[in-house]
Image (tube, helix red, strand yellow):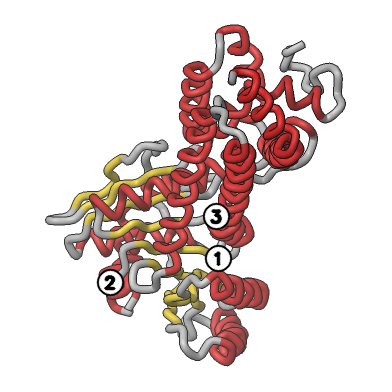
Amino acid sequence: MRRWSAFQAGLHEFYVGPYRQMFKREKQDEDDLFMIAVLGEALGVPDPAAYYTAELLPAVWENFHAWHRRIGIPRSPLDHIGCC
Amino acid sequence: MLLTLAGERRVLFVGGKGGVGKTSVASALALARARNGGRVLLVSTDPAHNLGHIWDMTLSDSAARVFTAFNGYVDAVEIDPHTTIERHFTAVSATMMKLLPERLHRSAKQHLELAKTAPGSHESAVLERIAELIDHGLDTYDLVLFDTAPSGHTLHLLTLPKMLTGWTESLLASRSRSDRFAAAARGIVGGEDQEAAADSELRRTLIARRDRFARMRQTITDSTTTGFVIVTLAEKMPVAESLDIVRQLRGLGIDVSSIVINRRSPDDAGSFLAARRKGEDACLQTLREHLDTVPLIELPLLVRDMTGEDALEELAALLGER
């Protein structure tokens, strides 16, 4: 019985997994874009709303490290953020 | 005429080309309104303040009483963007320290220091303070009167609420898409969302921001509440610039309530000034042809320099007549 349910779960994952990955990737892309919008000024993109984007920093700060790794920058691209 | 306007509207902006007498007209209008029993908040948004010089007082970012009449009074503020910037970033920093683990504090602080000096920060801070003063002024004053910087700076400032509302909308839309993808991924195979807390924080901040911009936009584009008074001289360049301001203000949906023609030369004080007056008449003709619906108010050239309460009283008396 236990093995049967494990098999069922596996089967479910087999069919459904790829879609979940797809949605996760889409979410990730959206979040990465958001990160660029918020950090724009620091990354050298003039941001007319830098004063206001600063308000959003607290919520994205912790994802910064994961973000720069994901977009293919191995070390922190901002001198003053020594996350790695 | 101008005084009637000041009695009807709650928020007035006084603007125009540099050196045409915006501050004098705004101050005299504030004084006249206070004499009529109004509580007036007079605010200078010009980075190069001279409101204090006119009233012979040192003014700051917090309101100080410059004039008291029987029932009314005038409180004056010279907006100091640095004060607002400091306050804003102190608040952001406090939120960050609360949300972030200890090890990230130092770099977060450094980043905020840099954001403070970003090119747009100065301007955004002025806008922020204007929004604050409008909110506060509508509650506790009868009239909020803005003595603005020369036109370019002010017009740009007035386009910001619209632009920034769009900006927050698009960021909010990005959050919604992100949420939907996360929900879709979750819906397929359960699982919890660890980022929900940070995300709702983001959303709250963005929504509060958007509402504030929207409220400001609504106030300044409501012609029963807000009006724009353009001050100009009857000379070619100021007139051309005034026409340009009218066009841009109308594009922004802001009501141009009247145009003050300042320092009109007299026709009975010698041939020199009479000849000048002729030239001015021609300029006024141009203005009238283009703007037949906006009332024009003429103020004469005065002998004395526009500083101190006496001079303002003289100008205020003239405003009452016209």
Q: How far apart are the two marked residues, 2 and 1, measured between alpha carbons?
A: 22 Å
* Residue visible at 82% across and 30% down in the picture: A71
Q: Which residue is mark 1?
A: B16
Chain containing the residue with disc 3: B
Up the image or down, A1 lies above or below B123; here it is: above
* Residue visible at 52% across and 33% down in the picture: B85
Q: Residue B165's mark?
A: 3
On the image, the x and y values in percent for residue B62 come to 36, 37
Mark 3 or mark 2: whose residue is earlier in sequence: 2
Up the image or down, B164 lies above or below B117; here it is: below
Using the image as rendered, state which of residue B143 and residue B102 is in the foreground: B102
Chain containing the residue with disc 1: B
Dot 3 falls on a residue whose secondary structure is helix
Which amino acid type is marked by label 3?
Answer: Thr
Up the image or down, B49 lies above or below B235; here it is: above
Q: How far apart are the two marked residues, 3 and 2, measured between alpha carbons?
A: 28 Å
* Residue visible at 77% across and 11% down in the picture: A84
